[in-house]
Image (spheres, rainbow, N blue to C red):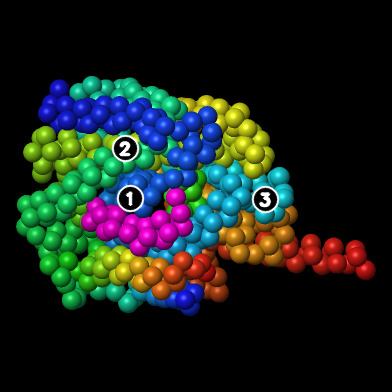
Amino acid sequence: MRKAYVLLIVPFVATLLPFLYNHPEPALFGMPFFYWYQLAWVLITAAILGVVVWLAKGRDV
Amino acid sequence: MSNASIVLVSLVLAVTAMGFLAARWGGANLESLEQWALGGRGFGTVVSWFLLGGDLYTAYTFIAVPALVYGVGALGFFAVPYATIAYPVALVVLVRFWGVARERGYVTTADFVRDRFGNRALEVAIALTGVVAAMPYIALQLVGMKAVFAQLGGGFAAHDGLPALTIGFVLLAGYTYTSGLRAPALIAFVKDALIYVTVIAAVIVIPAKLGGWEHVFAASQSVLQSRPKPSSIYLAPSQYFTYASMAFGSALSLFIYPHSITSVLSAKSQAVLRRNAALLPIYSLLLGLLALLGYCAIAAGIDVPQSAASSIVPLLFARFFPEWFAGVADAAVVIGALVPAAIMCIGAANLFASNVFRTFSAERSPVETRVAKLLTLGMCAAALAVIFFVRVPYVIDFQLLGGALMLQIFPAFVLGLWTRALHPKALLAGWGCGLVASCTMAFASGFGSNYTLHVFGTSLTGFIALYALVVNLLVSMTVTVVLRTVSDGAKH
C-alpha cells in the first residue's frame, strides 16, 4: 500500500510548528512540556516509520 | 597516568587492534573498491544499525549539541526535531537511491548524477561539494577528541593536545587504509555500546545529584536569563521560524553527506534500510538526553566562556563519575569521534577517486581503489592540518558552512532520483548560485548559522542552508525553462 507513505507527513507537522509545544505545562518528571514532547516524538516517529514500512510491504514511494 | 587515562588508552588500543583485524572479516579481496569502501555491500540489519548509528551520531552529538544548549538554551534543542524528521526523509530518499545504486553499481552520489544527467561538470561539482563539506566535519571530530584530552591533562593536553590527536589520527589512518569500511563497522559495536552505557549512566546519575530535572531546568532558566546576552529554556516567538528551518534544513542534508551514503550503500538490501529507518531513531533519543547535559552543566555551576563550551561534557564526566568510569565515558567520546571520521575519510576519498580523478564507469578499475586508499590518508592529514592551523570556534563555523554547501547537491541528487525534468546545465547554475548564496550569507552574518532576511517590512531569521537551497531551486527551474525554450525555438 503505497498510500501509507502519506503518514510520514505527520512527524513534520508535529515537530516543525514550535508554537504547538513551546510551553512549560504539563511537565513530566520535572521536565517541561517543550522537552518531553519532542523526545516523545522521536519514539512516535519511529513507530510511524515501522507502520509505514509494514503497510507498504516493500513498495517504494 | 590517572585511572581515567589508563581506561581510555586501553580501550583506544583495543579498537585499533579490531580495526586492523577487520581486514580479515569475511575474507574479502580488498583490492576491489566495493569490498574496501562498501564492505562488499553485504551488511545485514544488526551490523547496519550499529554502523549507521556509529556513523551519524558523531562528536557533533556528544560535544557540539550539549555545548549549543549550554550556550543558547532552547534554540540548541533543534537537534532533536532534526534527528527525528531525518528518518522519514531517509526512508523515502535512501531506499530509492540504494535500489538504483545496486542495479547500476554506484558507489557515490556523483556516480548517480553522472549516469543520470551525463554531464561531467555536474559530476565534478557534486563530488567536490562532498569532499569540501566532509573536511570540516572530520575536523569537528578532532575538536571533540581535543576537548576530552584537555580535560585529562598531563601528556594528553601537552602542546594543546596536538601530539595526542596526531597519534590518534595516525592509528585511524592506518586501519582505515588497511581494512576500509570493515574497520569502522566492527569498531562501531564497541563505540555504540560505550555510548549507550555512558549516556544512560549520565542521565540517571547527573540530574539526581543535581536535585532532579525540575531543579536543573529552573536553575538553567535563571542563569540563561541573567547572562549578558540573555536566552531562555523556551523559544521566543521570533525564534520559531529559525528553530524549524534549522531542523528541516539539517534533516534534508544529513543523509546526503558522503559518510551517510557510504554506510547506506553497504547495506545488504532495501529491507535492511527500511527496518533501520524505524530502528535508528533510538539513537536520537540519546541525542536528546545528551543535549540536556547542557542544562546539567549550567545547573552544576560550570561556567566557561562560549569559546570553551565544547569542554562541558568531559567536565561533567570528571565531576560526577568515579575516575575509572570517567575514562569509559571519555573513551566513548574519543571512539565516538574516530568511527565517523574513518567513514567520512572513506566517503570523501571515494568521491574524489571515482568522480574527480576519474569519471564514473560501471567497470571499476583497481587504480580507483588505490587512489581512494591513498586519499583516505590525505583526508586524515588535511583534517589534522585544519586543527593545527584553525581555532576551534572557527572549525564549528566551517562545519555549519559545510552543511549549507552540502545541501546544494539536493536538486541534482534527490530530485534527480524521481525526475529528469531539470536541465543539467541549470542544475549546475543552481548549485553555483546556492554556493555563492551560502558563503555570502555566512560571511554577512559573521559565520553564524542563520541569516536575517528583511522582506515586506518584517524580518525573518532562518537557516542559511535552507535559504541557499531556495535560491538554488529557483535558479535551477528558471534556467531549465530558459534553456528548453531556447532549444525549442531553435528546432522551429
Estimate the x, y position of residue B317 in percent, counting from the top left: 16, 42
User: Mark 3 falls within which chain?
Assistant: B
User: Mark 1 falls within which chain?
Assistant: B
Q: Where residue B187 is drawn, which disc sits there?
A: 2
Check residue B412 for magenta coloring.
Answer: no
Residue range highlighted in magenta: B268-291
Identified at 8% across, 38% down, the residue is: B322
> Image check: B280 left or right of B42?
left
Camera-side residue of B37 and A16: B37
At label 1, the amino acid type is Val
Asked where in the image residue B394 lies, by quadrant, the reply is top left
Which residue position is annotated with label 3?
B115
Marked residue nearer the N-terminal end (3 or 1): 1
Estimate the x, y position of residue B32 in percent, counting from the top left: 54, 33
Identified at 66% across, 35% down, the residue is: B358
User: Disc 2 vs disc 1: Cβ atoms closer than 8 Å?
Assistant: no
Q: Quadrant of the C terminus of chain B?
A: bottom right
Marked residue nearer the N-terminal end (3 or 2): 3
> Image check: B364 left or right of B390?
right
Which residue position is annotated with label 1?
B46
Between the residue at mark 3 and the residue at mark 2, the CA separation in whole angstroms equals 34 Å
At label 3, the amino acid type is Asp
Which one is in front in this view, the residue at disc 3 or the one at disc 1? 1
Instruction: Say whether residue B165 is visible.
Output: no
